[in-house]
Amino acid sequence: MDYDHSSSGHEHPLVSIIINNYNYAAYVSQAIQSALDQTYDPVEVIVVDDASIDNSREVITAFGERIGYVGLAENRGQGGAMNAGYAASHGEVLFFLDADDLLDADIAQKVVQRFAANPQASKVHFYLRVIDREGRPRGDAVPDHVLPGGWVPSKPLWRERIWSPTSGNAYRRDRVAPLFPIPEQPFRISADVWCNVLSPYIGEIEAIQGLGGSYRLHGSNNYAGTITSADMLQSVILVNTARTAALVKWCEKNLSPSIQPRVGLWTHVVKQRMLSMAILPQTHPIEGDTPWRVFKEGMSTLPGLAITVRLRTGAWLCLWLALFTLGTKKLREQVAAKSLSGQRGLLMSKMKVMFYGIKKIGLPGL
């Protein structure tokens, strides 16, 4: 596919819609069609197949010359597929569309208008309606908070951490070029975290307070927020630690000393480390961790949280410090096991679990 790029930076910049696919033959044709159906022109559609083992290749190549096709010989994960798509693309505006999601027909036009109105913007994000396996709207949208805009690092940390899933973001190429290539090993899944954490530090964010596409939930999505075993927990800790290290390293190398990034503060990682020490201390993956050290790190993340989350998280941390100080090893294992029984994201925020631990410790008045 050949394009005239002379319009770059002018009224009609080329838009690249990069679709990353792995074993989504059942959905990828719908994603491609939604990209081809954009009312804006010019648009290039590039589909990266991440070494699928279903019939994705046949489905994708059936679109012929209307799309660009990149077939990876080995599976590289979402980060690798996004890197391959970025390298093959030419657009000034970049969308990364998951193969099971959809874009509304007018979203490219709206995004281009936002970028034209704000030359300092690095990203435009928008909401996605949630649809089921068959594409039927469920009546809700993601994210479920107001999307932030402007110079986002000036806002509370919890506002900085609100963004749309992969398909609900578009990036200005000349702004986000320093973010590529994405570190592939720690970002095999949820590679959008890399772009969405760092893009606010290289430009302003434009927020479209309306729908721009569809986010499909079908039970096979690669991202899963539930950790159900100690081994899985400790593997996730290693991945999250590597992610944080990569984010911090990028900031140290690329950002002005006057910018103080908050990329190392992740409350959920602190909670994972605390649970790991409780349920499987002999193989805990972070050298030098102690309950007191993790407690202090967790408390340092509280000022950036919303007030209700701050109170709940503070209570959670105090409970676990008490469990390590006053409770038995068996009790810690029991409480940790409850939080590994399918509660999303290891938050263990339900009061019945917290009260279970408090009562078992036998604190006065309970």
Image (tube, grey):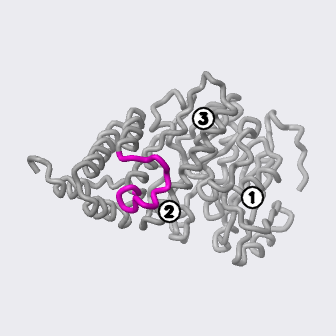
Q: Which mark is residue 200?
A: 3
Which residue is the site of mark 1?
36
Q: Residues within 10 Å of mark 1 (few under 14, many from 20)?
A: some
- Return the disc, 3 or 1, that comes first in the chain's sequence: 1
Decide if residue 335 is on the left or right side of residue 177.
Answer: left
Asked where in the image residue 53 lies, by quadrant, the reply is: bottom right
Q: Position of residue 297 (x, y in %)?
A: 41, 39
Q: Is residue 203 left or right of residue 333?
A: right
In the rendered structure, are the residues bearing label 2 and label 1 in contact, judged by CB atoms less than 8 Å apart? no
How far is the residue under mark 2 from the one under mark 3? 25 Å
**What's the amino acid at mark 3?**
Pro
Give the camera-side residue of 263 and 192: 263
Name the residue located 52 percent from the left edge and 69 percent from the top edge: 218
Name the residue tied to disc 2.
224
Return the x and y of residue 208 as percentages of the image width and height.
57, 40
Between discs 2 and 3, the one toward the N terminus: 3
Q: Is residue 287 magenta?
A: yes
Magenta region includes residue 223: no
Q: Which residues are magenta?
A: 276-291
Toward which corner of the image does residue 284 lie, by quadrant?
bottom left
Label 3 sits on a secondary structure element that is helix
Q: Amino acid at mark 2?
A: Ala
**Pointers 2 and 3 in contact (CB under 8 A)?**
no
